[in-house]
Amino acid sequence: MKKQMFIGLFTALFTLNVSAYDYKNISTDIGNGLLPVEAAKHSHDNDELSENAVQDLVDANVDVVKAVQTVAKEWSSCEDTYSSVRKAVQISPERADEIVAAIATMRGCSCNAQSFWARSRLEQRLRPRIRRALVQISDTCSCASAGIEAAIELVPNKTEDMIDAVIMAKNRAHRTADSIGQIGNIPEKKYWGDNQIVTKDTNLIRNTEVCNGDYNEQDEFSPEETWSNQGDESNLAVFNFNKKLGNHKVLCEKEKQEEKQAEYENSLIITQYIEGHGSNQALELFNSSNEPIDLLKDNYQVEVYFHGYEFPGEVIQLKGLIEPQSTFVVADANAAGDILSVTNQKVNGLIFKGADAVVLKSGFNTSPCECAVSTVASAINGMDKESNNNDVISKSKKDFIQRIEQHYENTNLQTTIIDSVGQILTNEEDGNSNQDHPIVVDKTLRRFVNTCKGDRIEMDEFSAPNQWSSFPVDNIEDSGRFATQDCFATRKDLLITEYIEGTGNNNSIELFNGTQRPIDFNTERYILEIYNDDDADPEQKIYLKGQIDSNGVFLLSNDDADDALKDKSQQVTGELKLDKARAVVLKKVVMPAYQACYADIANWIKNDINEITYILTPHRDPGDGPLPDDDPRDGDDGGELASPN
């Protein structure tokens, strides 16, 4: 009760101060010391448009992801959410996945089926059939549906990445390992702490006696209790050692440490927090246990909560291996060189500014996929823009559905595509198919060193010169020695880096591990599929065996190849036959719970593609329905209304 009274009093005082302030624009407000959330509220109270507010915040040097989430929180209508996301994606199309993921973590965007129906009819003429009365979209996924629909219009080529980001954001890790700040609260000074030990424009170092994290991100936060400032002096050699980013040692009682670790089953803590100018943002993590920690396998995530919100603005999937008693540095990809030189994982959007909270989480969330299917429904319907005739399905929509079905198979082995070379053929209903041609004829292909991300769309047209260099047939001099450049913040997994369809049985595929951790194919299952001619199903499925180190190379060759090629190989098999191959696809058996949702999605969209719809059970009263002359009920013809997604 006291907390509610305090919040009410704070809100009243804040509203009074804002209303008494002579409004000019967002830039002026931020220049006068207001937080983005305060400037956005002021802009909303003065009837500014949501899309203009996003632009103004970005112009005031607010990160675009923080800007769009701030505006969507203040302008809570569905149309405003849609407009703000669209503006943000226009500003930074390369970060569309981050933008829609930030929106997906929110709830209550006041989206109902009528708002989607009206806009679709008037602007996009999307009118798929539904089977029952329009209802309010589930509160848990209304924001995600609005966000994905807005973004898909501008960057349809990033659809898979956006869906991945949204589903991961909706199925976050559930166990807190450590935290900085207090979510849902803006500190009085707009940063936490007193004197020098504050979370604004600083570099904080965890005290040497701290071996366990702050497991409650909702309690009061006082950094001076467990943190020191970079400029502090100490006679302890270990403290001075810890000042250097990428170094850390602890001096705590082992018994208490083990007791706490047993209680929370966690030994990873945040040991440095750098909130510098511009993009100089970084976190140092420390593994205090005697066992290595695989961040991806254990699903460690960093959540950044913007200025007092109770939902995260960024959900960053950590990837890498932390050895015992060692550190792992996560930094913004645009940070200064001295930070990046010791960084283990570079990410876009690691932005925290004083009043933001940072939470380290781990473990898997076994809850249902929530809005996964409705989000995909929105994306599918958003692809259908090439025809105004409801009876004609656009090629874009059909291709997208085929990609989803292929991308995440609904089998006992749920798989996801990591990379591909060539093109899988698709037979059309009229019997025609894509022109048949092999990947390459009498050539060796090697990936460009600046290729950082695999080709996940295995059905698109393959053009070797876009990412590959050609060499003479049987050229194996550089096989097994691929080394790529620093790939900023985009590299995600394995890459196919060499394709040799040589004379006789000199067939070979080279893989490069661009992750920050070793991969053991005995525990993480990867499959190499080879498609011949116009087959829709693979001719061969080769399960990879062995292991590949971080930044290491793995060569797979035919067991009848020349000895010079086999001697370089980590795996040889008679199944590797490339003489008729038109596509080679690298797949991974999915482990994270959020990726497994795709198997259900793939099964769901096998229905008639004329009726890509999904009805969610409303969580509350649906409110006003469509206008009287727009009957929402399912008539004899099935009803010509838009999907509520």
Image (cartoon, helix red, strand yellow):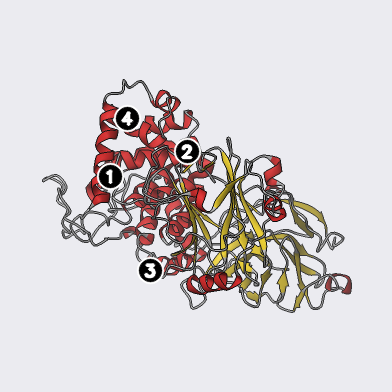
Of tags 2 and 1, the one toward the viewer is 1
Nearer to us of marks 4 and 1 is 1
Q: CB under 8 Å between callouts 2 and 1?
A: no
Mark 4 or 1, nearer chain start: 1
Side of 76 relative to 573 (left or right): left
Q: Earlier in the sequence, mark 2 or mark 1?
A: 1
Residue assigned mark 2: 64
Q: Is residue 641 visible?
A: no
- Secondary structure state at the residue bearing disc 2: helix
Residue ID at (40%, 51%): 183
Q: Earlier in the sequence, mark 3 or mark 1?
A: 1
- Name the residue rendered at 48%, 45% in the picture: 96
Report the Cα–Cα distance between label 2 and label 3: 30 Å
Label 3 element class? loop
Judged left or right of residue 365, residue 22 is left
Question: Mark 4 vs mark 3: which is more N-terminal?
Answer: 4
Q: CA distance from mark 2 to mark 1?
A: 28 Å
Residue topped by disc 4? 42
Which numbered tag is attached to residue 633?
none
Say whether disc 4 or disc 2 marks the residue closer to the N-terminus. 4
Q: Secondary structure at mark 1?
A: helix
Rendering quarter of residue 613: bottom left
- Horizontal and vertical percent position of residue 56: 42, 28
The residue depicted at 51 percent of the width and 64 percent of the height is 407
What residue is pinned by disc 1? 7
* Mark toward the start of the polypeptide (2 vs 3): 2
Q: Which residue corresponds to mark 3?
A: 367
Q: Nearer the viewer, mark 4 or mark 2?
A: 4
Q: Residues within 10 Å of mark 1 (few under 14, many from 20)?
A: few
Residue type, mark 2 in image: Val
Residue 615 seen in the current view = yes
Closer to us: mark 4 or mark 3? Answer: 4
